Amino acid sequence: MLEVLIIDDDDIVTLVQGKLLQNCNVCESPLKFKRASEALEYLNSASPENDYLLLLDINMPLMNGWEFLEEIEKLAIKEQIFVYMVTSSIDYNDKEKSKNYSRIVNFIEKPITIKNCDQLKEHKYFKSHFE
């Protein structure tokens, strides 16, 4: 099973992303977290039977996306976690930095689109969940 988590401190973004993921048949009800620390708590007790797709923002209060990525490397289920960085950042350095993290499979500038969802469903890590 594929679980989808949206981790973003902006309520509008999580609402729009959630609706788009539902409309594109990526998932019925993505889990939404305003704080990265709450998502980390959830993943810490998550099932190793599932795969986890995280739509992760970079710029968040308390724990940003980069700090969150460092923390998920400590989780027992880290091999089942795949991250799409979904950010408003247009900083070239952020895109380059994302290449240093094995969990990141894509870097998308907000907002996500139908095309992004279609590409996600064809990605080698997720394709089997949509066949």
Image (tube, rainbow, N blue to C red):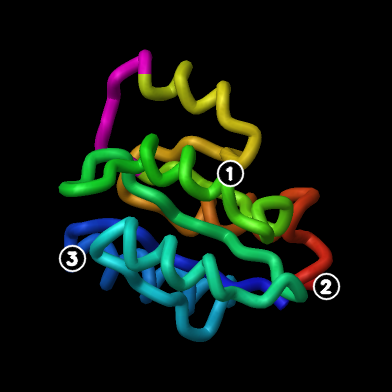
Q: Residue 16 location in percent, x, y?
A: 29, 67
Q: Which residue type carries mark 3?
A: Ile
In this rendering, which labeled residue sits more in front, label 1 or label 2?
A: 1
Q: Judge the density around disc 2: few (<14), some (14-19), many (≥20) Cα neighbours within 10 Å.
A: few
Q: Secondary structure at mark 1?
A: loop
Task: Provide residue 42's location: percent of width, then percent of height.
Answer: 46, 72
Q: Which mark is residue 12?
A: 3
Mark 2 and mark 3: Cα distance apart in space: 31 Å
Q: Position of residue 123 (x, y in %)?
A: 72, 50
Q: Nearer the viewer, residue 124 or 115?
A: 124
Left or right of residue 130: residue 105: left
Q: Are marks 1 and 3 in contact (CB under 8 Å)?
A: no
Q: Is residue 1 left or right of residue 41?
A: right
107 vs 77: above or below: above
- In whole angstroms, how far apart are the C-alphas of marks 1 and 3? 29 Å
Residue 3 vs residue 110, the one in the foreground: 3
Q: Earlier in the sequence, mark 2 or mark 3?
A: 3
Q: Is 113 rendered above or below residue 20?
A: above
Classify mark 2: helix, strand or loop.
Answer: loop
Q: Which residue is mark 2?
A: 131
Q: Amino acid at mark 1?
A: Glu
Query: Splitting the image into 4 quarters, where does residue 26 fall?
Result: bottom right
Q: In this view of the protein, which residue sits in the foreground, 43 or 29?
A: 43
Q: Which residues are magenta?
A: 87-93
Total numbered badges shown on the rendered structure: 3
As displayed, is residue 8 above or below residue 74? below
**Residue annotated with mark 1:** 73
Query: Of circles 1 and 3, which is in front?
Result: 1
